[in-house]
Structure formats: C-alpha cells, structure tokens
Image (cartoon, rainbow, N blue to C red):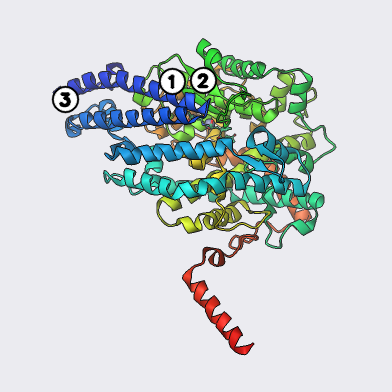
Amino acid sequence: LVSTSWSQPLVLDEAAAITYLEEYDRLAADMSYQYAEAAWKYETNITEETLANMTEWSLKRSDFNYREAKNASRFDLSKINNQNISRLLRKVMDIGTAAFPDTVKLEKISDLEGEMTSIYSRARGCLNTTTCLPLEPDLVDIIANSRNYAELTAAWKGWRDASGRNIKKLYPEYVSLLNEAITFEGKYKDMGDYYRSSYESPTFENDVKALFLELAPLYENLHAYVRRRLKEHYGADKFPSTGHIPAHILGNMWAQDWTNIYDLVAPYPDKRTVDITKALIDQNYTIIRMYKVAEDFFSSIGLYKMPHLFWEKSLLVKPVNREVVCHASAWDFSNKRDFRIKQCTALTEEHLLTVHHEMGHIIYYLAYKDLPYLYREGANPGFHEGMADIVTLSFQTPEHMKKIGLLDAIPGQNDTEGDINFLFRMALSKAAFLPFGYLVDQWRWSVFRGETKPERYNEKWWDLRCDFQGIYPPVERSNADFDPGAKYHIPGGTPYISYFVSFVAQFQWHKALCKVANIAGPLHRCDIYSNTIAGARLNDMLKMGSSRPWGEAMLKITSGTSGQTDKLSVAPLLEYFDPLIKWLQENNKKYNEILGWDKKNCPNFLSPHILSGSPRVQNITFILTMMSALFS
Ligand SMILES: CC(=O)N[C@@H](CC(=O)O)C(=O)NC[C@H](CC1(C(=O)N[C@@H](Cc2ccc(O)cc2)C(=O)O)CCCC1)C(=O)O
Ligand SMILES: [Zn+2]
C-alpha cells in the first residue's frame, strides 16, 4: 500500500489508516474468494442447494462490507492528505446495497436474482407443442442460420414466452428492494444512480447520450441498406411503412449483432465470403485449441499466458449431466492465482471471438493482480469490456486470419470490393450493436427512477427498441409480456452501458496502439499481433486498475498520438468505418432509400390501455356499450 501511495507527508491518521487497509486487503480478498467459489458452484451446477449456498455467501459478503465500512468511517478523511489512502478508504465505504441493515430484504434481493437467473438459464423455448429447446446452442443456432420467416418467428416468440414471461412476476419486487436498499444511506437517488457512479462523472449520462447521437448517421445508413437487402429476400410485405425491420431476421436473438446474416446482405456477394466457422470445422479445431489460439495472441504482444489453474478449473464445454448458466463469463478469484472462464463453447467463429473476449477479461485481471484488492477492477466498467474486445479488432482482420491459417486468400487493400465486404462485416457487429448497447440501460434507469412502472415495462422497452434500433416485434406484444427479461443482463442484474462505452473506447485504443506500434495502412486493416510495443502501452493502462480516475487511464493509452484525450470520443470509430459510411451513403442514394424510421410509432405493440385496463378506457367502453344498447 505504502509503495502505491504518492510521496506526501504521512500524518497520524494516515499511518493508522495504512495499517487498517493492509488488514482489510487480506480479509476482503478472502471474502471475495469465498463468494466467487459459491457463485461458481451455483453457475456450474444450478440446484436449490447451490443457489442457497450462494445467497448465504452473498449475505456474508454484505455483512463483511457493512462492518468494514463502519470501521473505515472512523478515519477523518479531511485529515488524510494522501490521495491514494483517501481513495482506498472511500472505496471501503462505498458498499452499495450492503449499507442496508435489513438483511432479510438483502437476502430476498439475492434470492430473486438467483431465481430469475435460474429461470433464464433453464428456460426452453417451444417452437410448437412438441419441440422445446434451450437458448444455447439450439435457439441461438436457429436465429443465426434459419432463413425461414415462420421458423424464426417461432424461435423468437418461444424464447420470450419461456424466459421473459416467467421472470416478469419477480422483477417489480426486485426493483423496489434494490431501490430501498441503495437509497437507505441517502448517498444515491436510485439504483441507476449507483450503477452510473462507477464512472465518477456527474455528466456521464449526458455524455453517452451525445456520443450515441454522433453515431446515429452510421447506424441509419447501415440500417437502410440492410433493410433493402432483407426486403429482397423476405419480401417487402414483411416490412411496415414505418421503416422498421422485423426484430427476428437479423441473425441474433436480440438483433444486437447482425454478422450471422452477412451471407444474405454482403455488398459484393460473389467475392469470397470468409467462413471461419467452416474453416474451424475443416481443420478439426478442438475447443482447447480455440483457447490456445487466444492465449497465443495475448502472449505474442508481451502480455500473459493463462496460469495453470485456469486450465485446471475453467468450464469450457456445456456439461451433459447438469444445469449450468451457459452465458459466457470470466472470473477473478481474488487470490492472484485462480482465474477461470465458464463458457458452453461451440466450434463457431462467434464463439472464437467470445473466447478472445473472455480471455481479455482474464488478461486485465492478471495485469492488476498485485494491486491492492480495492483497485483490482477496470478503470471503469466500460474499460474492462473494451479490453475484452480490443484484440478482436486485430484478430478479425483478413491479414490475421491468414496468419493463423483460417483464411487462404485475403482481399488486397486496393481490392475495394473485398475491403468494403470486410468493413461491412465488422459494421454488422460493431455498428449494429450501438443502439442496443445504449438502450438497455436507458430502459433500466427509467425503471429505477420510477418513470416506468411495472404495467408499462414492455411498452417502454419497445418504445426504445423501435426508437433507437428501428426494429419491431414480428408478433404482437403487450404489457403482458416482459421482453427485457429475455435478455440475460436484466434478470442477471449486470449493467449494460459498459458495452456501449467499450464499443467507443476500443476504437480509440486501437487507433492509438496501431499508431505507437507504427503499423501503417488503414485502421481497419491494422493487426497488433506480436507487436510488443502496442502490448506494453496497453499493459501500462491495465496495470492501473481503478487506482486513478479513468480519464488518466484513457490518457495513458492515447498520449502522444493524434487521438490524445482523457475523454470518450467516437472520432476513431467513425474514422475506422469512414470508407464504408461513404459507400453506404452512395448506395442508399442510388436506391432512393429513405434513411431512418418512424421513431414514435411502433408496429405490433398493442395499444397499452386496452391490455392494461386503465380506468379511463374502462368507462369509455362502458359508455359505448350503453349507447349501442340504447340504439340497438
Ligand atoms: C464474473 C463476471 O460476470 N465477469 C464479467 C467480466 C468482468 O466484469 O470482469 C463477465 O464475464 N461477464 C459476462 C459477459 C459475457 C458476454 C456478454 O454478455 N456480452 C454482451 C455484450 C457484448 C456483445 C458483443 C461483444 O463483442 C461484447 C459484448 C451480450 O452478449 O449482450 C457474452 C459474450 C461476450 C461477453 C462479458 O464477458 O462481458
Ligand atoms: Zn465482457
């Protein structure tokens, strides 16, 4: 601790604080280990017992945090000059819902979250009266590969009926208990306020809104082009005059990543389309080899190999004999040795990217493992996600795919059509995601603020989906449904704006790393593989953990380059896609495509009043009935 403190004179309180913090560090890491083991046992074997054990440890952890926050409040921060010590003490005292003394209600929150995650992880969506399938891999594969409109509709609706509908009844209490717990101390206005506080910026909410608006032209051009091409395939009758795209024909259960329909909408289809999944199968890739390839990327830039416990304790394939939480995740067991991935890995390109993503989290854990426990987190949550994603910007380049033998011919950089095809494919994941990455927490923050009540949960969700994503539900929805519950992070209670922040930041970092590594050529063809200069610059930021406000971490990566800044900026993302934006604008103009959609009118969402039976409607109905009786 002393080594990380800034050289300032120590006063009595500080010396005592350092002694206290060293003891705290050991106890907190141990408590975190115990909780992680309990959570791991639950997620890799969903039973009543493992859920109860996890809840028990969740309570023990809250109780520990509560006691230590009380201990830390003995120190008078006004007498602590050392910034490092005061930052650590503030983190000990910033314990969120654990400050709430009503442990019965805290237990209920943990139980509700566990129960909603169990429902989500065990749900089977029915395609008809006889066939009911799990989300991974079955329903995901149908949505990715089927080109049959009716079959896609059945999988889309089946999943939501099995997940969201069954989670709906638990969510209102979950929200009110979280708000009651988080507002108890008076530090936070509601749970959304607490989530946003991890960005340490009072203007954060408006900052992300401004970033999103700057990205709208890119998304609208992609949306207009993809809509036209999908009309050719599915028939214009499936597309309403409002300009929306049906939500279930974009290759992903939540329409958040459109790469799976690349074959349907590629700009130059005759050009060789990369099929990495096929290459993985043809080359008899094993699951383990997917992880070795990812490990090789990180070690090639001078970062880290996976510790031996990783290979010993990770769960990399879906077990056949028990229920698990298949949603992939990376785990830090807070003992500097034990780091794991849990993933129901399948032999597909999408999973190979997820392997790199999860291992990117592990690399971040390894980079800051020797910091004080309280600093072992991302500079902000979006930074952890950005680190997880950044290597995929190099890994997916044709150059890199050729280097590792997953692609034989690469489109030359002067092969404009091949280059546009590649950029387009990257846009199907990195641009298509932006409105979704933005809207999930717009919905959740409006719920936590009390602006969106339970009887309008689904209406607000589709207002946002129709407004920001320009998609609409293929089958009628109402407030009897709960479609937000069909997305893992809502029942799981995990924040989502971190992904939007990540998608902006990762392009800032990619641009800066390619610059310092002196890699020539356009940004979208830059591959930092085996470039230790890029790796060292990245590592310098990772090693900071959350010891300093995240603007300093952003500066650490971007300093000395044209993108030098301590803020988020969409300029590098727009620079990366610039050739494609021009191509899309030209193509949309050629076909007289009207960009955008009717943002205030969502097809297929039944007017909420009739279904929610608001009194206003009831007495209108009553009068109409009486009048018709009079005149009949
Ligand atoms: C113990 C724990 O929870 N650990 C955290 C990590 C940490 O905080 O230390 C963690 O493992 N979270 C799981 C989560 C999994 C995935 C995810 O949920 N992705 C989002 C959004 C997205 C989409 C495209 C993309 O390219 C990147 C992200 C989605 O699928 O909607 C699933 C596939 C990819 C990442 C993750 O790794 O972020
Ligand atoms: Zn992640």
Q: Which of 414 and 628 is in front in this view?
A: 628
Circle 1: is it few (<14), some (14-19), or many (20+) Cα within 10 Å? many
Instruction: Determine which of the numbered discs, if any, sits on residue 13 in the image.
Output: 3
Q: Position of residue 290 (x, y in %)?
A: 65, 19
Q: In which quarter of the image is residue 551?
A: top left
Which residue position holds label 2?
340
At 51% from the left and 37% from the top, the residue drawn is: 117
Q: Which of marks 3 and 2 is nearer the N terminus?
A: 3
Q: Quadrant of residue 21?
A: top left
Circle 3: is it few (<14), some (14-19), or many (20+) Cα within 10 Å? some
Q: Which of 396 and 617 is in front in this view?
A: 617
Q: Which residue lies furthest to the left in this view?
A: 12
Q: Position of residue 408 (x, y in %)?
A: 79, 22
Badge 2 amino acid: Arg
Whether ligand 1 has any atom under 8 Å from the Cβ at mark 3 is answered as: no
Q: What element carries label 3?
A: helix
Q: Distance between the residues labelled 3 and 1?
A: 31 Å
At 42% from the left and 30% from the top, the residue drawn is: 52
Q: Position of residue 195 (x, y in %)?
A: 40, 41
Badge 3 amino acid: Asp
Q: How far apart are marks 1 and 2 (CA)?
A: 8 Å
Marks 1,2: beta carbons within 8 A: yes
Q: What element carries label 1?
A: loop
Q: Which of marks 1 and 2 is nearer the N terminus?
A: 1
Which residue position holds label 1?
333
Q: Is mark 2 on a helix, strand or loop?
A: strand
Q: Position of residue 439 (x, y in %)?
A: 53, 48
Q: How far apart are marks 3 and 2 (CA)?
A: 39 Å
Circle 2: is it few (<14), some (14-19), or many (20+) Cα within 10 Å? many
